[in-house]
């Protein structure tokens, strides 16, 4: 039985990347710590929502605690590429964010999508908890936004054949 909770505290890196051509890209959330690599599949819409939620959280944190572990104007460059091997543990059903004020770290939690034979959510899904700095999460948010915007100009055509009759 797989380990039900995997925690990387804190991560060495965290990224979102894609595999495959436009229209058939598969989005992956990936993080690593001390040689341990964790990858999960997420939907494009989840990447978009995560990017927006992180940006909102960082804005709120900056209002409450200016400076913190990250300077919004920082020009740090992060390596946001996926690391090999890209072997997903699971497909994420839901994700959430939390904040540890004492350590000034943000946690990203992703829970496995598990469905049983009756198409009901199965009990005891796997969960990953990825702890990172404000800088790491800001880079993740900005990178995810860029990836989402790199899709086809009309997202309704992603992966579908459209017929036009005249």
Image (tube, grey):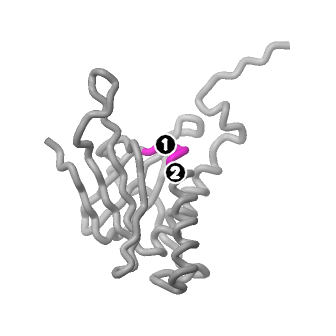
Q: Residues within 10 Å of mark 1 (few under 14, many from 20)?
A: some
Front-lying residue, 66 or 72:
66
Residue 40 on the magenta span: no
Q: CA distance from mark 2 to mark 1?
A: 6 Å
Quadrant for the N terminus, please: top left
Along the horizontal axis of the image, is 101 left or right of 22?
A: left
- SS of the residue under disc 1: loop
Left or right, 20 with reference to 129: right
Q: Is residue 17 above or below residue 123?
A: below
Residue at 52% from the left image edge and 63% from the top image edge = 54
Give the residue drawn at x 44%, y 60%. 15
Q: Please, which residue is most extreme toward the front here?
A: 64
The reply to whether callout 2 and callout 1 are in contact (CB within 8 Å) is yes
Residue 13, which numbered label?
Answer: none
Residue lying at the far top of the rendered structure: 166
Q: Which residue is mark 2?
A: 47
Looking at the magenta stretch, what is its main secondary structure?
helix
Q: Which residue is painted at 32% across and 33% down in the image?
A: 121
Nearest the viewer among 118 and 110 is 118
Percent x, y for residue 62? 55, 79
Could you tell me if residue 82 is visible in this image? yes
Give the answer, above or below, for where 104 lies relative to 106. Answer: below
* Magenta span: 42-46
Extreme-left residue of the structure: 1
Q: Position of residue 111 (x, y in %)?
A: 34, 48
Q: Which residue is mark 1?
A: 43
Q: Judging from the image, what secondary structure is the residue with disc 2 in?
A: helix
Task: Establish if 29 lies above or below 74.
Answer: above
């Amino acid at each position: 039985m797989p380990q039900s909770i995997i925690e990387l505290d804190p991560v060495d890196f965290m990224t979102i990347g894609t595999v495959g051509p436009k229209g058939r890209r598969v989005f992956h959330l990936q993080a690593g710590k001390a040689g341990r690599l964790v990858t999960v599949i997420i939907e494009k819409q989840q990447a978009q929502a995560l990017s927006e939620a992180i940006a909102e959280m960082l804005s709120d944190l900056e209002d409450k605690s200016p400076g913190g572990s990250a300077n919004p104007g920082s020009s740090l460059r992060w390596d946001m590429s996926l690391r090999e091997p890209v072997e997903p543990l699971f497909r994420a059903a839901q994700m959430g964010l939390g904040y540890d004020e004492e350590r000034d770290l943000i946690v990203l939690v992703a829970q496995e999508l598990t469905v049983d034979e009756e198409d009901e959510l199965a009990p005891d899904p796997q969960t990953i908890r990825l702890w990172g700095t404000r800088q790491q999460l800001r880079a993740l948010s900005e990178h995810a936004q860029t990836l989402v915007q790199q899709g086809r100009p009309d997202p309704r055509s992603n992966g579908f054949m459209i017929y036009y009759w005249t």
